[in-house]
Structure formats: C-alpha cells, structure tokens
Image: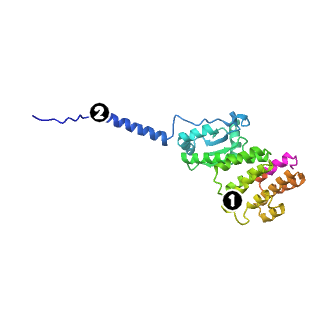
Amino acid sequence: MNKQGSTISTPVWLISIAVILLLARIVVWYMETYQPQEALGINWTEPSKIDLSGREYQSKLVLYYFTAEGSEACRAMNSTSLLNKNVVKLVNEEFLPIKIESKLNDEETEVGKLHRELQQKYMVFTLPVLVATLPDGKEVETQNAYAGVSAKQVLRFLERCQKREGYERGIDYLAHRQYAEAARSFEYWLRLVDNTKRDSTDGALYCALSYYMLNQDKNMHNILESVLRTKQFSSGNRWPKPLAEFMLGELDAEGLIKAADRESNREPRMYYFIAMHELKAGNTLSAIENFKLAQKGTFTSSEVYVLAEGQLNAMNMHQ
C-alpha cells in the first residue's frame, strides 16, 4: 500500500495571479513616486487674463513659465518635470502659475506683444525659463532650463523661491515705511535660512533696522547680538559688524564712515543706515542728503537704491 504525503499543493494559476497582482502594485507605486502624473497638471493661466494688483493674489508668489511652441526643450520639460506630482502640488498650492508661450505668427497680436514685454522685463533670452516674482513684479529667483532640469531641481528652485520671498517682501515693506510688516517678513526669512552664513546677515540687519524704526529696542538688540555672535563677524572690524555697532550706539556716524574704508560696495548701505538714523531723529535735511549719497554710485535696480528711493519719494524729495 503506497502512502501519499498530506501536503496540499497550490494551483499554478493561483500563484500566477498573485505574482501578477504583486507586480502591478509595484509598478503603480513606482509610477506614483517617481514618474510624472499624466492625470495631474499645473493650473497655468495667461497673463492677459489676470490682474496681479488684485488683493486676492498678494499672498502668493507669481511663477512665470516662459516656453515656446515647437521647442524640443520645452516639450521635454512639459512632459517630465512639470508633470511630476510633487511639483504640480507645490505650484498649484503655493504659487500663482502663469504661462508665457511664444507661438508662431503671434508677433503682432496683443498677447504676443505682452509676452515679449515680459520676456524683456525679466531678460529671458533662452527657453524654457521659470521666473518667480512678487505680485508687484519684483523678481525673486530665475531657473534657466534650456539644458534640461529634473523634477528634483525644479522642487529645489521652488523651495529657494519660498525662502527668498520673506526677504524680498521685507525690502518692499521697508522701502514703503511699513516697518512692522518688514520686521515680520525678515523674521520669517531668518527662520528659514542658515544664520551662520554671510548672506543671512543682510536680512538680520534690515530686520534690526525695522525694529529700530519701531522703537522696539529689545527685539533690535536680540537680532544684532545674533549677528555679532556669528563666527565670521565675532572678531576684528569685519563688515557688517560696524553697522550693528552703529545701531547699538557703540559707533557714531563718523566712525561708521571710517569703518567703510571708502569701499564702493559698502558706502551705499552705510549712508542708507545713517540716513535712517537721521530720519528717526527728525533731521530731515541730513536724512535726505544721506539717502542721495546712498544712491550715488550704485545701480538703480540695486537693493539700497530702491530703499533710499522709497524714503525720498515718501518725503517728496525725489529728483
């Protein structure tokens, strides 16, 4: 009598179905995680169809996408990085996306003329390009993509824009004497950046200046002390340590001028801070003189020029 084993074999067809289902789940997971999502898309709008001065748009950054009909590089970007689900989600939720698409034979149309104006304004010479701006048109960051950019690179660009937004808004508020809003914007930016690096000190100094104009000495001191503790400025007479000491009352205007050492890249900001000090003290004529000195020898698009221009316009002394 032959004895058979008691194990129950699983039908081959059932194993095959299980393997197919498992592979299908793996493919779906991979597509959702790493591949563009064809079902999703950025909610682009035309610049002619939106009024950026509208109050509802003031809380978001504008993201311009400069592209062209028939461009291989643009087609590649449209079908890859700009369809990535993480890029789509971030742009749609946090930005106001506007597409500037150049088309054949649209040179004489109103839309075509508007597109060219925007290209000239943001100095777009190659396509595709992403440009992030504040609603008032002030440029925040640019990403050239003619050589191709991955979804990861686009995400990093968008994150840099979000970090930079607080700084740019702070400059805008400071130029328009909205010191409380400026302080909040710079504080927000400082929380996002590495405050051990030199590029964070400008924002810290402008933040301290905003508190200075608001007579909030405690907040001003806290910001300035953090600047002075920064390793690269904690010793010697390295810039911008003299500016911090000037606002703390440890250095007078004459000492600040001497500390600038006649270096052209330092003088405009030095005169701007002296002018703000004079403005707060009620010395209007001295403030005007120093605001004009701040503008002298610097580009009209430079940060310090814009800040001084805002103050001069407010005093109706712009020439």
Q: Is residue 306 left or right of residue 48?
A: right
Rendering quarter of residue 135: top right
**Residue 316: in magenta span:** yes
In the image shown, does 99 or 207 lie closer to the viewer? 207
Image coords of residue 69 (percent x, y) = 59, 40
Q: Residues within 10 Å of mark 1 (few under 14, many from 20)?
A: few
- Residue 125: in sight, yes or no? no
Position of the N terminus, as image quadrant, is top left
Which of the two residues, 143 or 33, is positioned nearer the viewer here? 33
What mark, if any, has residue 229 been given in the picture?
Answer: 1
Could you tell me the amino acid type at mark 2? Trp
Secondary structure, magenta segment, majority class: helix
The residue that disc 2 covers is 13
State how far apart marks 1 and 2 are (Cα). 71 Å
- From this view, report whether residue 280 is shown above or below residue 90: below
Q: What kind of element bears circle 2?
A: helix
Of circles 1 and 2, the one toward us is: 1
Residue 251 lies within the magenta run: no
**Three-letter code, disc 1:** Arg
Marks 1 and 2 in Cβ contact (< 8 Å): no
- Residue 54: image x %, image y %? 73, 34
Q: Is residue 147 left or right of residue 48?
A: left
Residue 266 vertical placement versus 43 (above, below): below
Q: What range is drawn magenta here?
A: 306-319
- Identity of the residue drawn at 69% across and 62% down: 234
Measuring from the top left, give residue 98's x and y in whole percent: 65, 38
Instruction: Tell me the element at label 1.
Output: helix
| Residue 314 visible here | yes
x 73%, y 35%: residue: 55
* Scheme of colours in the image: rainbow
Q: Position of residue 101 (x, y in %)?
A: 63, 40
